[in-house]
């Protein structure tokens, strides 16, 4: 959500800078002790009877992604901006200089990351239905049902603890990584070093580089805190990590050890991912007292008085404000709460309008996009309905 997170598609992805994105995110610890396997054999009936053995099915943990790129060896340490960063890490964070210099020396320049964060060229008009079809589809729905069934207790505990419905958590994890199936194949240190000091030309290049320098710093702080090799962290092309695609700073701020094993592992622990997503949403405005739907389909009047209400990432209007501007919901809005009006453009087809509450806007803090937030809502709903069948 990633914050951010997660910042997975250049400037369009957010959660305090990409699930600040989120991705957007998690440590690569092995939980072998949590996985058990067994085999059972039937005893022989007699010397003349063939031995019958029944091998128990062993379920393997998902294979960790492998690095499938070489990167380019660049002497980052010769760059003045990098030397300033190293000085800062030593002075502000108390790192050993030799340790920081060794990390920078081993980092690889990733031209692919530079190209992937570039804004997409102008293309077709926005199309909500085409966008949502990528996420509300059988593979994700079926995977969501399995994930929910396997983690029902953790989802129920998160809902009770944080007030975030299980279907919203399931929706985010499904949209982000198909429940951990696609968490990224880039070494986070390589990505963040590249983008922190060689971000592509853009109007906000300096701001983007400052953001990624902050994420590189968070990566090193995280690795030190958890006593791991920073190069063991894998993630997206923007540095988002784990099932929920949290950026490293979001792991430090919002990561939760929800399985109680003493570490925050957003890659290997579904429970940690569930708790961390719920915590992120609460910290970004989720209102547990606002039960019921987060979105309400709406019709708008031909007078166009409602146009000034569209936009923004917060709930600001009372039901009477919406009604007075010509916005009519198909079901009554709960009183005593504020709402917003969002537009979901459909290319050449009519735009959809929805009245949404503060909880919808909490999802947009994970990724600053109406399309993203609505996909989370719809995927979560589809998984819940499929699970009930």
Image (cartoon, helix red, strand yellow):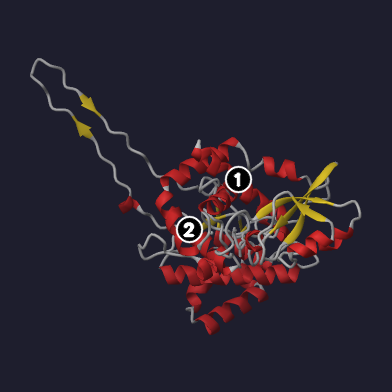
Label located before the other in sequence (1 or 2): 2
Residue with the most extreme bottom position: 91
Q: Decide if residue 88 is on the left or right side of residue 53.
A: right
Q: Quadrant of the N terminus?
A: bottom right
Residue 310 percent location from the top left of the image: 80, 60
Residue 147 percent location from the top left of the image: 47, 45
> What residue is shown at x 36% (from left), y 66% (from top)?
262
Q: Which residue is mark 1?
A: 379
Q: CA distance from mark 1 to mark 2?
A: 17 Å
Q: Decide if residue 47 is on the left or right side of residue 247.
A: left
> What residue is shown at x 46% (from left), y 48% (from top)?
64
Q: Comparing marks 1 and 2, which lies closer to the viewer?
A: 2
Answer whether residue 268 is visible to the viewer in this image.
Answer: no
Looking at the rendered structure, the number of numbered marks drawn on it comes to: 2
User: Based on the displayed image, in which of its 4 quarters is residue 132 positioned?
Assistant: top right
Q: Residues within 10 Å of mark 2 (few under 14, many from 20)?
A: many
Residue situated in front as seen by the camera: 243 or 300: 300
User: Based on the displayed image, in which of its 4 quarters is residue 319 positioned?
Assistant: bottom right
Residue situated in front as seen by the camera: 329 or 173: 329
SS for dot 1: helix
Q: Which residue is mark 2?
A: 159
Answer whether residue 377 is visible to the viewer in this image.
Answer: yes
What label sits on residue 206 in the rendered view?
none
Residue 11 percent location from the top left of the image: 72, 61
Q: Decide if residue 263 is on the left or right side of residue 332.
A: left
> What residue is shown at x 43% (from left), y 63% (from top)?
264
Measured along the vertical axis of the image, is residue 279 above or below residue 37? below
Measured along the vertical axis of the image, is residue 299 above or below residue 348? below
Residue 109 percent location from the top left of the image: 63, 59
């Amino acid at each position: 959500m990633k914050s951010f997170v997660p910042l997975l598609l250049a400037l369009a992805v957010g959660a305090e800078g990409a699930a600040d994105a989120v991705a957007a995110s998690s440590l690569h610890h092995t939980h072998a002790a949590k996985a058990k396997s067994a085999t059972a054999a039937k005893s022989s009936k007699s010397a003349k009877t063939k031995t019958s053995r029944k091998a128990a099915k062993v379920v393997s943990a998902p294979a960790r992604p492998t690095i499938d790129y070489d990167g380019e060896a660049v002497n980052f340490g010769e760059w003045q901006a990098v030397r300033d960063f190293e000085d800062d890490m030593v002075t502000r964070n108390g790192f050993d200089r030799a340790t920081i210099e060794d990390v920078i020396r081993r980092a690889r320049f990733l031209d692919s990351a530079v190209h992937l964060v570039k804004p997409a060229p102008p293309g077709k008009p926005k199309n909500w239905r085409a966008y949502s079809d990528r996420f509300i589809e059988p593979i994700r729905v079926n995977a969501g049902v399995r994930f929910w069934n396997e983690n029902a207790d953790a989802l129920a505990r998160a809902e009770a603890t944080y007030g975030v419905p299980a279907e919203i958590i399931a929706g985010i994890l499904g949209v982000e990584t198909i429940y951990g199936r696609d968490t990224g194949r880039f070494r986070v240190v390589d990505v963040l070093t590249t983008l922190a000091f060689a971000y592509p030309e853009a109007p906000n290049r300096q701001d983007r580089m400052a953001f990624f320098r902050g994420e590189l710093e968070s990566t090193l702080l995280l690795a030190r805190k958890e006593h791991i090799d920073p190069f063991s962290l894998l993630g997206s092309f923007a540095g988002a990590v784990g099932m929920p695609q949290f950026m490293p700073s979001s792991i430090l701020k919002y990561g939760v050890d929800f399985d109680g094993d003493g570490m925050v592992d957003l890659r290997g622990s579904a429970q940690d991912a569930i708790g961390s997503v719920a915590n992120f949403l609460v910290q970004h405005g989720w209102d547990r007292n606002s039960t019921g739907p987060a979105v309400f389909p709406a019709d708008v009047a031909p007078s166009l008085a409602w146009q000034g209400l569209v936009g923004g990432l917060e709930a600001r209007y009372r039901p009477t404000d919406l009604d007075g501007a010509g916005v009519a919901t198909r079901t009554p809005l709960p009183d005593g709460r504020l709402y917003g009006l969002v537009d979901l453009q459909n290319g050449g087809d009519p735009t959809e309008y929805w009245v949404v509450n503060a909880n919808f806007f909490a999802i947009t803090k994970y990724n600053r996009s109406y399309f993203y937030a609505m996909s989370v809502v719809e995927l979560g709903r589809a998984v819940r309905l499929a699970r009930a069948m």
